[in-house]
Image (cartoon, rainbow, N blue to C red):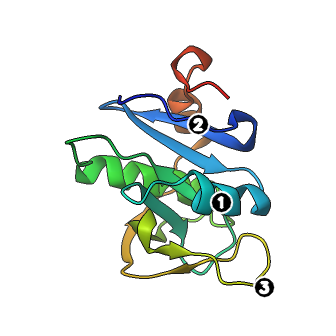
Amino acid sequence: MDEPREYDRRRVFEYELPGEWLVIVGRTSQDNDWLSIKVAHPSDWWFHAKSLPGSHTLLLAQLDREPDRTALEQAAALAAYHSKARSAGVVPVSYTRAENVTKPQGVKSGTVQIRRESTLKVRPMTPEEVKILRAKPSQSPPS
């Protein structure tokens, strides 16, 4: 992984995907705003279950390396797991670079606008799969 990113670990769930990709997921609508607008770097990948309540999810970018389709699908499956569609069979998940995510003035917490989105149709991860991917405290950035 690249240099650890500074953020408040109490406000997110953290997951380490194969290939040393780090995914962080907002816990509340206020945390979603903070994650998408304050923490996200323009080159990070942003995910959210399409047209459903759920957590904002970031796949943190790495220098000189792009995530493969498997990493994108796993991040999307985590976004689906952290949504109202957790128990659904297949869930459409919107994704884009974080630079395409904005917060309009005056809208409620957790509401953003996204441009240039693509969609992945994924099966939400199971609780067992999520448990395996949870980042260990020693591998996570400091708070």
* Image coords of residue 57 (percent x, y): 55, 55
* Image coords of residue 110 (percent x, y): 72, 70
Looking at numbered disc 2 in the image, what kind of residue is underneath it?
Glu
* Image coords of residue 21 (percent x, y): 38, 37
Dot 3 or dot 2: first in sequence order is: 2
- Circle 3 is placed at which residue position? 106
As drawn, is 18 to the left or to the right of 39?
Answer: left
- Circle 1 is placed at which residue position? 55
Residue at x 41% of width, y 28% of height:
3
Q: Which of these two is toward me, 143 or 84?
A: 143
As drawn, is 11 to the left or to the right of 56?
Answer: right
- Circle 2 is placed at which residue position? 14
The quarter of the picture where residue 72 lies is bottom left
Q: Which of these two is toward me, 74 or 63?
A: 63
| Above or below for 115 versus 80 | below
| Above or below for 135 versus 121 | above
The quarter of the image holding the C terminus is: top right
Looking at numbered disc 1 in the image, what kind of residue is underneath it?
Ser
Q: Which of these two is toward me, 48 or 90?
A: 48
The quarter of the picture where residue 117 lies is bottom left
Residue at x 50% of width, y 31% of height:
133
Looking at numbered disc 3 in the image, what kind of residue is underneath it?
Gly
> SS for tag 1?
loop
Q: Residues within 10 Å of mark 1 (few under 14, many from 20)?
A: many
> SS for tag 3?
loop
